[in-house]
Image (spheres, rainbow, N blue to C red):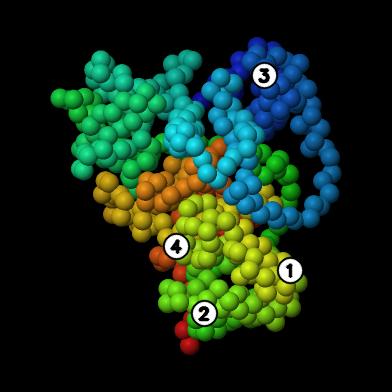
Amino acid sequence: MSMRKKIQKKFRNRCCSLKLDALNSILAFTDQFPNDHEGEAIDLLLDHLDMENNNISVVDAESVQGVINLLLGANDVTEEPVASSLAVIDSFLVPKYRYDSVNKKFIEDTSSLSVHGKASSKIELYRDRFISLLQRVSRSEFFSRPAFVDGEIENYEISPIQSLNFEMGRKWVMGVISQLEDGHFYLEDLSASYFSLTVKYRISPGFFTENTIILAEGEMHGGIFQVVACEFPPLEKDRDKTQRETHFGKDIERQPVDETFVILSDIWLDDEEVLEKLEKVLNDFESGEIVPSLFVFMGNFFSPSSCNLSFASFRKQFGKLGRMIGNHPRLKESSRFLFIPGPDDAGPSTVLPRCGLPNYLTEELRDVIPNAIFPSNPCRVKFDGQEIVFFRKDLLYQMRRSCLIAPSDKDPFEHLAHTITHQSHLCPLPLMVQPIIWNYDYSLRLYPTPPHTIVLGDMSEQKTFKVGGTTCFNPGSFSTDSTFVAYRPSTQEVKLKKIKEE
């Protein structure tokens, strides 16, 4: 594709049209970046145009030249070193954004949200999920209608399910999988139409459960929509830098900081063998050359056999962990410690998102370790431009049990990673399987700001897999398998580690 066509296509995706003199100015600008094959310079130019002219539909040369001068002038400024920063975002503090179909952009929803939603909140949950993915599909090069015919790419059109009543032939539809009768699948979209669904041929990787949103290719036969291809909505190739501002504020370009995160899941504080293994890990990093900037401890923090213990005993064990960390002065002074509750830890309920560990249990630990943080589950972390999502949930087991269509023989964790990233949601299970606070479902979504890394704490064996531009990994169960992960945000390098048995 020529540079001229690439520029025109990117502006069309932002619902803007270019005047001829503006197009020539942009072509001259892109000529200064001959190795920019992905068009990142154009994206950056578009981001600044959006920020300065929110409602502009026709871009002229004057607007373009002003932004170009600003960008080229920024290259001449000597950057001063900026200290590395780490921000932890609780799920209940994540801003809510809603897609505006008129202006074709995401806008912040500033309305107050109650934990106890109305009946309409449940409807909005499904509607917002669907609309968000529908606009992503509409931006895909395979499903966006081109202004000019280009023989290089074959384009398709998404048909409303309702149109299958009177349109013949093979069609692509997008809908939510429903199982209204045992063994019979249905598709539903915003037109509230249902059609029986049978899958005869290929499906893409992933777990197809109720409530997942799919693209299906097929045609009607005898009142049944027979599917020949079934797949998840495609990912966007390029990260939208403008939308990166939604959860964390504007990114600042800085030199990569070579830091390490240590992530452990299932730290059973009532098990002496587990505490001995944990102390060995802390001793190794205390005496090492590099001190990790962050330790992430994910629940469950107590073994299944601890159900008869009192809250006073739980509190005592957290205090013991605090004193253990305090015995390592380098770690206590230089590292921060993140404690994320597990599905069976103490708390008001098992509904997602879960609030942080109760203050009563962690008070003794806080007194010893002032750098301890107790966020919700899930939570988000920003570190030097990297966005990382931490989620502790035995999700693989539940997804496999809820799967309606048998997946291929690929590794189950690959299917899980595909499902979460393509659905843009951390837990796309039916609400009967995993309840979610209706008004805070948005805090589990991974769009419009897809993270760089997703950490899925799971009881299954440790794994790592990359989908698109997102790295997904499971640190494994530290208590049962002695496994954990050392992660470098600057390079997205995941080192799977295991304590050697003596």
Query: Disc 2 vs disc 3: Cβ atoms closer than 8 Å?
Result: no
Disc 3 target residue: 55
Q: Earlier in the sequence, mark 2 or mark 3?
A: 3
Q: Earlier in the sequence, mark 4 or mark 1?
A: 1
Q: Earlier in the sequence, mark 3 or mark 4?
A: 3
Seen from the viewer's position, the closer of residues 272 and 153 is 272
69 sits left or right of 437 in the view: right
Above or below, 108 against 296 in this view is above
Amino acid type, mark 1: Pro
The mark closer to the camera, 2 or 4, is 2
Disc 4 target residue: 458
Q: Quadrant of residue 409?
A: bottom left
Q: What is the C-alpha distance between the residues marked 2 and 4?
A: 20 Å
Amino acid type, mark 2: Asp
Disc 2 target residue: 270
Q: Residue furthest left?
A: 222
